[in-house]
Amino acid sequence: MTTLNRAAEDRDTTRPPRAVVGSQISIDEEIFGAAFDRKVVRRFAGFVKPYTRTMYLATAAVLVFTAAQLTIPLIISYAIDEAIVAGGGEQILMLCVIVFAAVIAVNYGANFLQDRFVGLTGERVIFDLRSAMYAHLQKVALSFMDRTEVGRMMSRLQGDVNSLQEFLEHSITVFGDLVLLIGIVVIMLTLNFELALLTLSVVPTLVLVRLMWLPRARKAFRRARETNSITNGALAEGIHSVRTVQGMHREAVNLELYGDKSRENLWAHLRSAKFAQAMVPVIDTLTGAAMAIVVVVGGTRVLDQALDVGVMVAFLFYVQRFFDPIRSLTVHYSIMQRAMASGQRIFEVLDVPLAITDKPAAINPESVEGAIEFRNVTFGYHKNQPILKEVSFKVNPGETVALVGPTGSGKTSITSLLNRFYEIWDGEILIDDVDVRDYAKVALGKHVAMVLQDPFLFTGSILENIRYRTRDATREDVEKAAKIVGAHEFISALPLGYDSELEQQGNNLSMGQRQLLSFARALVADAKVLILDEATANIDSYTERKIQTALQRLLEGRTGIVIAHRLATVRNADRIIVLQEGKIVETGTHDTLIDKNGLYAKLYALNYASFDDLPDEIINNSLTAPVRS
Amino acid sequence: MDDTKTANAPQQLSSRIYARSYAGLEIDPDRNISDDAVVLWRIIKLVFKNRIRISFAIIGIVAAACSQLMIPQFLGDAVDGALGLAGQSNVSPDIAREALYSAAIFLLGAAALRGLFTLLHSYCGESLGHLIAFDLRIAFYAKLQQLSFSFHDHVHTGELITRGMLDLEGVRSFMNTGLLRVLLLLILIGVGAYLLISTDLILGLLALSFLPFVIWKSSVSQLRLRELWWTLQEKMAVLGRIMDENLTGIRVVRAFGAESFELEKYGVGSDEAYDLAAERIKIRVASTTAMTFVYFLAMGLVLWVGGLRVIDGQMTVGTLTEFLAFMTILQLPVRQLGNVVNAFARTLTCASRIFGILDLQPVVADKPGAVGLGDGIDKIKFENVVFAYPGEGQPAVLNDISFDVSLGKTLGVVGPPGSGKSTIAHLLPRFYDVTSGRISINDIDIRDVEISALRQKVVVLAQDPFLFTSSLENNIAYGNPWASEENIYDAAKVSQLDGFIDGLPDQYETLVGERGVSLSGGQKQRVVIARTTMLQPELLILDDSTAAIDAGTEQRIRQALKMQASKSATIIISHRLGTLRHADEILFIENGQIVERGSHETLVEAGGKYAALFALQSKEGEEAVAQIGGVKE
Ligand SMILES: Nc1ncnc2c1ncn2[C@@H]1O[C@H](COP(=O)(O)OP(=O)(O)OP(=O)(O)O)[C@@H](O)[C@H]1O
Ligand SMILES: Nc1ncnc2c1ncn2[C@@H]1O[C@H](COP(=O)(O)OP(=O)(O)OP(=O)(O)O)[C@@H](O)[C@H]1O
Ligand SMILES: [Mg+2]
Ligand SMILES: [Mg+2]
């Protein structure tokens, strides 16, 4: 923390630094489970289901493969016993070798099919999972998405899916190994029951050690996982915020803080690495012990001529193979545990309830009139904190209504509700006298076009961005819309014109240009209801005026809701609704509102007051001083 | 074999991607992914930075391999011991038993030793992986924070995050699954080969006869996998970008009901990625299983030839068992060889993607011998500045711009969208460097000033600012985490946030959602204003920072800012002329050129573009326009 301390001294304050990197949302979302979580496995099975047939084939291949694997030592043992020790001679040896060749050929084929089937299906399932998650997120309520961070979601969509993949890579063979394990036990028991029991007597020790090891190891692994997610979150934030960081000169502090987080992550991983490897010597020693038992007990029997030497050799082979799957299961325990934890995080996403869904009988009309009505709408983002209170208003088809009010008064919220981004607490919102909840959501998207306050553009060409909603719009449609908003000029000045590629979020355009594109995008949608939320806030009055003149024609026969702080933008609206702290305080045309001398008149006065700095008291209580010439 | 084609494919791909992302920026566009050998060498250098661990890892591997190799010998002894009596009567049973016991003890000892040494090398290996990942992670983060705007303008955040997450992980896992395992495999085969060949030349050669095939097969699939991994990681990054954008722009997606279109877009990317992933699996499976098959063939040969020799009495059964047991030991490594090859391919890909970023140099960096800024800013000067955004074929967006601002003065800037106002703002703290001309502070070219000193004094309030998922308080104090509570409250007061914050249940502790989703447009802008005023810059640049704020609130903010104005120079970019009204000089920018300049009064008098704009915004002007026609009549 040297930089922090030094800087703190520089500033000579005793205040603890409040610098943090990474999200401050608590991590109670990180729920971790055992390496084998029944629920996760069951859910997982659901995703494998479509591939049942392949899985049957794979299982068959696994069985054949295992059988072949198990036969190989038997053949060797037979060869040694019959052909060599018992002096059966070359014919028998020849026979053994031929059978051996046949078995390994079968083994090869089965192995190939098994790995291929399991591998491909596994990969398919992983892609299916990611797609399912992504598709689900397209439907999840915005109120949920507001609370989650893109970085964290991405960490699930990529990081967690990736650890499942890693698991798959390592465990392609685990399934076969497990079957093999059972097969080996069965064969050993049939070959020589007693010797088999004696050999397997080491297994309880293994189980015991494992039981002691498990809880502590699990904790270590969990910690490693958690710190991973935290560091990745901080990285994502660092990347997203890089301009602010450089502008505010926080690189050094951030690097230090990030270093702390990564270091924590490192320690957690080192600790979990210890645990991951701790079982290795145990297993190896037990393998040795089992072999020693075979050698001593089996050897003695051979000496006593109670056992064929071939059986002893076979046992020695089996013991080695027996511990292989156990070893790989232990070594990969952390991978498995991670996979389970990841599975859980993935299913958590899939389990986020869709707060807002289409009703079964949701309608999707071809066209709407465009009448909008809010009836006593009460709404808030958090419990007991209503943002809109008993809001009622009506917009007739073809009418243009302006929403004005101080910042934070709820204008944007009203538009969000019209598109049913959120569910209202009370009241009704109607389009053409039908509750928005009775419309399919696609219908709302189709008939209500919005210019959002934050113009968001996608990576891709300008053309694709403008016709984002309307895939089938022609180049002419796009150009027409661009002309209306006055973007055509600058677009055609670009070397590639409408085919110019935009960088992330339109970074290579000016803010106003981005706003114009987002405006054009809404126009191309050709919807009956057009919502303009500060659509021209970053645009000069002159350009704005040109847009408005063009827009006037476009709005003919459409319903418009216009939000603007620059009152010149809205003064020609058919009606102006004035909001304050979530309530409608006035409605009327520009002239009636000015006459009324209320909040609107005050805001209007302030719009111009800015040209001559008014004394504070007038700014604060300018209600009393209607300015109108 | 057409090596050239396979080797070039990823390079062509990469240069295509670089061409799009980095053309003419911080990287030579012709740059290809570095040679595999170079990348590998760099990883190895990183590994050897940690001498102790790597030494222990190597010791552990050698010892583990040796103890493992001893096991077959003891097994052979044991079998011979057991057979000894069965076959011959001249050996006393006790001696045979003793041989058995000692073989058992040695077996146990060898197995335990193997376990311990495996622990040693696996732990060292894994921790080395983590240590390397740690170093790379920090370096990656530091580099990304350093790289200039021009880099970040062109490289998608989703892509960078993918690199920081997936590629880093690929490098980390390399130690155990790749590098050390190869070493283990080499030792097992090398020492084993020596032992076998020295025991029985022909049988030894037969036992190892699978090697040439395995080596050939693995190098062929290595090449192919390398190419596949490269394309796959690129595809994954694209998929990451699609998802990232979809989630970031979720409101647009929802507002336009474009979910199904988005799913389609994603589906295409996902299918492409799946095809590659499936291809990868097919190749891997084909090569692994073929290797195992050939290995078994060799085992069959050993059984046959060895059996014949035992029958002929040229060899004991024990020796044959030893041979076979040795081959069993190799079974797992041979099976894993496919994984190792895969790991190599993956790591080389991932590492070159990370090194690709680490090797970039920020275009805007301190010159050697850069100076500080002294006590304060007296005068900021633009002299004939010409600027084009970095990259090929980019037009000049600023042409011959000259102006100056002094301490206590305010410069106003207006102009249509895309005229170059924000660009001027970005040049001052050196987010980009001018193409020609000069920007100076106190007559020192800012390219000769330490960037840190410069950015401490020159602060831009960006047009699309970023808010952090953190408390309001932390957001306000972002640039100055040691600020006292009072400072924070003052800043909130200046930006007219105090009333709003006091009304919140958690007040200053209220969590701001990602990028400020839980705030209204105006609230967001005010948090940013508060954050900036906390820094008490000496040159403050407000880039259209009050566009989403109502006139009344803005007026109050301006009033409050005025108190600080005497201690700094201010540049205000705005579309609201009221905001600029009192600036000492106003520039009207169009197409990157200053077309009018002067005080408000002179400009209005001159009757040019500014005057026209003013007419639109003044009450008289507006009333006049209302007569002609506006939104609706
Ligand atoms: N997603 C959200 N979660 C929680 N609170 C929110 C969310 N969006 C807005 N708010 C709060 O709701 C209130 C109204 O916000 P809204 O965006 O509707 O205001 P607005 O009238 O559009 O203001 P502005 O003119 O500044 O854009 C604000 O106090 C804001 O903090
Ligand atoms: N990162 C960039 N890469 C390439 N071109 C850019 C980049 N940023 C802006 N431009 C281009 O440079 C020109 C000037 O942009 P700038 O952002 O300075 O305009 P502005 O005057 O601030 O406009 P606005 O009022 O809309 O904010 C525009 O044509 C824009 O498309
Ligand atoms: Mg708003
Ligand atoms: Mg700008």
Image (tube, coloured by chain):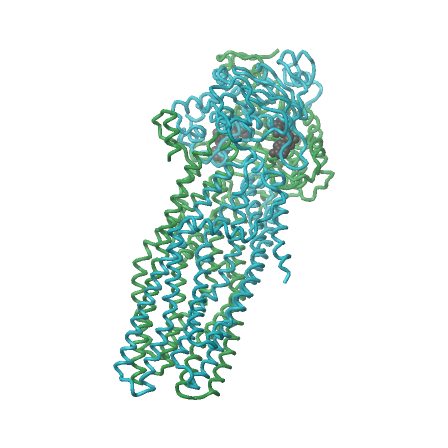
Chain colours: A green, B cyan
Residue A328: image x %, image y %?
A: 41, 62
Q: Is residue A392 visible?
A: no
Q: Please name whichever residue, A553 or B434, is drawn nearer the observer in this view of the structure.
A: B434
Residue A537 lies, with reference to residue A229, above or below; the image says: above
**Residue plotted at (56% across, 42% down):** B245
Q: Please name whichever residue, A620 or A26, is drawn nearer the observer in this view of the structure.
A: A26
Q: Please name whichever residue, A514 or A436, is drawn nearer the observer in this view of the structure.
A: A514
**Residue plotted at (41% across, 59% down):** A332
Q: Quadrant of ligand 4?
A: top right
User: For the image shown, how many numbered marks are present on the structure?
Assistant: 0
Q: For the N terminus of chain B, which image quadrant?
A: bottom right
Residue B488 lies, with reference to residue B75, above or below; the image says: above
**Residue plotted at (72% across, 40% down):** A475
Q: Residue furthest right?
A: A476
Residue A213: image x %, image y %?
A: 31, 57
Residue B533: image x %, image y %?
A: 47, 23
Horizontal side of A150 relative to B507 (left or right) equals: right
Residue B7: image x %, image y %?
A: 61, 55
Residue A355 lies, with reference to residue A121, above or below; the image says: above
Horizontal side of A495 relative to A243 (left or right) equals: right
Q: For the C terminus of chain B, which image quadrant?
A: top right
Q: Please name whichever residue, B87 or A342, is drawn nearer the observer in this view of the structure.
A: B87
Q: Is residue B104 visible?
A: yes
